[in-house]
Image (cartoon, rainbow, N blue to C red):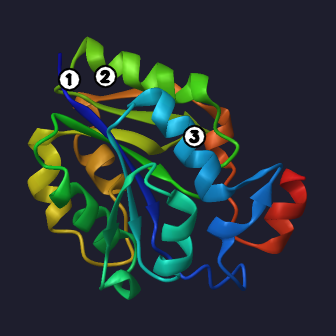
Amino acid sequence: MPKLATLILAAGESKRFGSCKHLVKIGKETFIEHQLSIAQTITPDHVAVVVGAYADEIKEKIHGKAIVFENKHWQMGIGSSLAHGVRQLQNYDGVLVLLADQVAIAQQGLLALRDRWFENTENIVCARYDNILGVPTIFPRKYYSEIFMLHEDVGAKHLIQRYIENTVAVDIPTALFDIDTLADLEKLA
């Protein structure tokens, strides 16, 4: 069976939020703990988190639930963190990329992504929401070299567009909602 890992990106500064949004609680868990719980049901024993800003604080919440990769160049943006994380996971056949602030995504959406990827592990499998194709996304190994080249505050959406003929979209409407500001948090509540 192909090996799949989940990579949670939690390296950003949360500038628009004003503090570390990954440590905000929803219910009894912080954002990062919530995402870890879901990720562990998708790829048990194969979950990693990229940290950067607030690295020490976030590591405390992980408590051995995942491998932690610290991106020393997190200021360069999400592309840098994605490249750093995938580089560490390059022995996997695919990497499911999940943002720590996409806390509205339920387990069934990620299971649907995983199941579609297992049907053809050469395809990129991504979420479709509000006419957008984006994260969460599973990238197969054949795209890693292009991900390694990312270094700016740009993710891998352009890879989805460039390889649209090899991309399968799964409807996950809740992927539209991520927490960037306090107002976004209020909407979640």
Q: Amino acid at mark 1?
A: Thr
Coordinates of residue 90 in the picture (x, y in percent):
13, 49
Quadrant of the rendered image containing residue 88: bottom left
Q: Mark 2 packing: few (<14 Cα in 10 Å), some, or many (20+)?
A: many
Q: CB under 8 Å between callouts 2 and 1?
A: yes
Q: Amino acid at mark 3?
A: Ser
Q: Circle 1 — which element?
A: loop
Coordinates of residue 46 in the picture (x, y in percent):
32, 39
Residue under pointer 1: 121
Question: Is any atom of residue 34 visible in this view?
Answer: yes
Q: Please tell me the numbered disc located at residue 117.
A: 2
Q: Circle 3 — which element?
A: helix
- What is the spatial separation of the Cα atoms under label 2 and label 3, in whole angstroms? 21 Å
Residue under pointer 3: 37
- Picture residue at 80% right of the left edge, 50% below the top: 28
Q: Mark 1 packing: few (<14 Cα in 10 Å), some, or many (20+)?
A: many
Question: Is any atom of residue 102 visible in this view?
Answer: no
Quarter of the N terminus within the rendering: top left
Nearer to us of marks 2 and 3 is: 3
